Image (cartoon, rainbow, N blue to C red):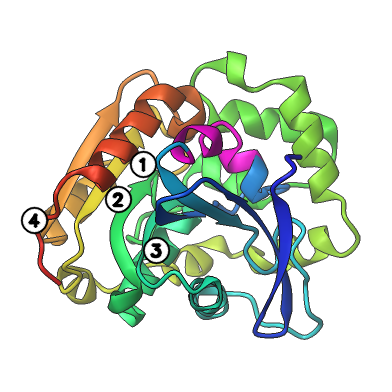
Amino acid sequence: MDTNSKYLDVNGISTHYHESGQGEPVLLIHGSGPGVTAWANWRLIIPQLSKNFHVFAPDIVGFGYTERPENIEYGVETWAQHLIHFIEKIGKGKVHIIGNSLGGALALHIAKKRPELVGKMVLMGAAGMKFHVTYGLDKVWGYEPSIANMKRLLEIFAYNQEFATDELAELRYEASIQPGLQEAFSKMFAEPRQPKLDALALPEEEIKQIEHEVLMIHGKNDIVVPYKETSVKLLELLPNSELHIFSNCGHWTQIEKKEEFSQLCENFFLRHSVVHQ
């Protein structure tokens, strides 16, 4: 883990996060895979983005190395409020957001709840729309801890199998077996999984009201979150949106297409805003 690893008290929750760079603030929100941490999701992107931006990458409550309070009810409301309190706590005013998968859904909820806290948004392989639980997502949410099982999940996440490394499998496996973590994870996404997925979605009428500039980025070969049911639909609903789809790419565009992904985000955040909020 990098040296910019820190902790912050966020509304009574000891929250682990990474901070790097200077400039306009960018919040990176990770996904929901087992053993996920902000570092596992964003370690290849943080060095690039921090050249031009002040990057913050927290572990959402219930994930990674952030505290897991007893009797907490995990779900969209808890996660979105935790991140809203985090944004308020760092005191940077409006932040750009990059949300991965679950993190993309949470970005939409944050923009709807507190539009004044959000600048531009990048939604990467984002949930937030209703779709049928895929084979890939079912495997991800049904994970039972072992290095072999983690390796199989990485093979689901990545189209290019070179990225499903033993090193990453070990990193995420170790994160997945912290005391209490698997119990929390299995409860978050227990069967039946469809209602859990549906709960992440924002009603279409509410999505239409989000006026922020939004860039969707998606891998065409994503077998966890299908691009046609999510990113393409979001393009139709969000009034100020655009979409970039990579061929030969799975659920991990920030890993499989790291240079291109970083460049797309940088260009999007740096160019002159066309929406006056």
The residue identified by callout 4 is 274
The residue mark sitting in front, 3 or 1, is 3
List x then y, in percent, for residue 37.
67, 49
> Which element carries disc 2, helix, strand or loop?
loop
Q: Identify residue for label 1.
A: 226
Disc marking residue 107: 3
- Residue 41 horizontal side relative to residue 14, left or right: left
Mark sitting earlier along the chain (4/1): 1
Q: Residue furthest front?
A: 22
SS at circle 4: loop
Amino acid identity at mark 3: Ala
Mark 2 or mark 3: whose residue is earlier in sequence: 3
- Residue type of the residue flagged with mark 2: Thr
Q: Which residues are magenta?
A: 40-50
Q: Residues within 10 Å of mark 2 (few under 14, many from 20)?
A: some
Classify 52 as above or below 89.
above
Task: Residue 193: give x, y in percent of width and height.
Answer: 56, 62
Quick one: label 3 or label 1, which is nearer the N terminus? 3
